[in-house]
Amino acid sequence: MKNIATLFCLLICTISFGQIAMNQVGFYPKAPKQAIVENVIGITGFSIVTGDKGKVVYRGKLGEPKQSKNSSLTTRMADFSSFETSGTYRLVAGSYESAPFIIAVNVHEPVAKALLKSYYYTRASMPLYEQYAGKWSRPAGHPDTAVLIHPSAATGQRPSGTVIRSPGGWYDAGDYNKYIVNCGITMGTLLSAYEDFPQYFARLGLNIPESGNGVPDILNETAYNLRWMLTMQDPGDGGVYHKCTNASFDGMVMPGVTKAPRYVVQKGTAATLGFVAVMAQSVRVYKAFSSVYPGLADSCLLAAWKAWQWAQHNPSVEYNQDGMNKRYQPAITTGAYGDRRFGDEWFWAASEMYVTTSEPVYKTVVSEYTIDRPSLPSWGDVYMLGVYTLLRKDTKNMANQLRPVVIQMADRYLENISGNAFGVVMGEQRSDFVWGSNGVAANQGILLIQAYLLTKDKKYLGAALTNVDYLLGRNATGYCFVTGFGARQVMHPHHRPSEADGIADPVPGLLAGGPNPGMQDKCQYEYTDPERTYTDNVCSYASNETAINWNAAAVYLLNAIEALE
Ligand code: 9MR
């Protein structure tokens, strides 16, 4: 009896305590291919078998055990990079067996496209028709044709309660509000993807209403948000409202169900400078498409210039929501995106303005803001977006100075891969696991792509690919983090339409936030070590929400990898 129990436990315990973590979407024939076997004892080899398990096609040795720095897991690597034959396979190591995976050219194209298409599903103020949205078609939500000026944003020309129009744009995340600060990094990242890979995106169709109009669909999609952003500028003084929002979050309902009043709130320096940067970059991108978007580039230039003037007069106006709520009614309790440091926004806005206009005044501002220890882009830290733009477009002047900023960070990532229990860049530091940590992984990948574009050294591409693997399954949670993809899928993102539409599958192409030991949502988590603090539960806005900013980083990374394959 005891023996049977031991045998039973051996089977069950092995299955429940270990797993094979690997990119669940697939591998390129000629690229590195690695998987991670967790918590194995007494096994030294692994094999790759055909999908029907009929035939062993490759045998390899597992790497040395590694203790993860970010959890209690011990891992061993299965490297089968030298196996290059296209097909469907499984990886087998002892009693562990992976789900089927593919080796093929263009293997990431469907997920790269879906990540970009997800913005169509987040459009406010218009219905999503079945021919584009399939089973996720829905009526329009939040027309935003009668938005109130909140008292915090009142001026002589637009007193509190004035009704303005602010339709369109993308919902930010799992919630239905629209935030200019987060549109800064999101639009900057998407427009940069286009600027870095224009030929690739010219061919990438998304089946959205504008498809076929002669403009790349990535730019058709960003135009939808750009036009909304233009409505967020006060025509009186050029300042930009921080957000267009309900007073408090809508419930877990479809867009359009609640009819709560919408407000634009206080203008701030971070929002206004982010707006300047996006408008300036849009001038460059949209001027080639003036027959389809007449006047758009010109409007953007004027809007950028006016916003820049406002910021000159208001160089450090913080959006402090708590402070604002002490002074004005109604209290606003939706996402704050409050930022107190503006040096990075000044640098980014000036970089975009300088590259677009070549006017020396902006170059002067760029040189005033050098940063000793630059960090990855995030909604509150956009310095690197300026660096990328200057490196991309101003190769003669400041580029030599800024190149080391990118290369040194990329080289540090490369050095740390070998010590990482998952063989990926993500998780070199515990502090990588923050709210939206999957955005950190994707932004590390973008930085590595930038290093590759500067040097053409393939080691950086290989490193970027490790974080593609991370997002698609080679991580300690075992999830493929993009909805609609992988063997272990995210099914319950904190995303109102996905929860409320009565359809089992969530809206596709959304990147979950990712492991976040902060656990600010107070949900139940099975694990609390940094790289495993993730729960596929709709309650978990701190680890399982979707958001346009981290989705944008994944759009860049996955499409760049496809473009460069
Ligand atoms: O991504 C934001 C994260 O960095 C902050 O810590 C968090 C709390 O302020 O807010 C996150 O952004 C959320 C925003 O405030 C509202 N929409 C959903 C966003 C993603 O969770």
Image: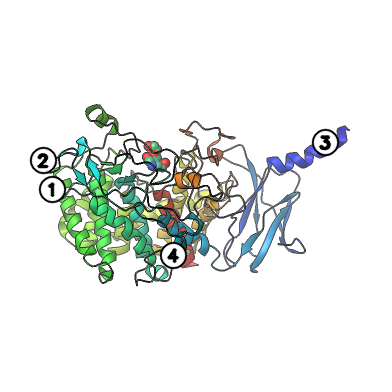
Q: Is residue 448 visible?
A: no
In this view, the mark in front (4 or 3): 4
Mark closer to the observer (2, 3): 2
Mark 1 CB within 8 Å of ligand 1: no
The mark that comes first in sequence, 1 or 3, is 3
Quickly name the residue at label 1: 236
Frontmost of labels 1 and 3 is 1
Mark 4 or mark 1, earlier in chain? 4
Image location of residue 560, percent across then percent down: 44, 62
Give the numbered dot on residue 206: 4
Q: Quadrant of residue 53?
A: bottom right
**Residue highlighted by disc 2:** 156
Residue 465, x across and y down, in percent: 52, 58
Residue at image point 16% right, 53% down? 306
Q: Residues within 10 Å of mark 3 (few under 14, many from 20)?
A: few
Q: Is residue 13 left or right of residue 24?
A: right
The answer for how far apart the CA atoms under marks 2 and 4 are is 44 Å
Q: Is residue 396 above or below residue 447?
A: below
Tell me the number on the disc at residue 6.
3
Ligand 1, by image quadrant, is top left
Q: Are marks 1 and 2 in contact (CB under 8 Å)?
A: yes
Q: Quadrant of the N terminus?
A: top right
Q: Amino acid at mark 3?
A: Thr
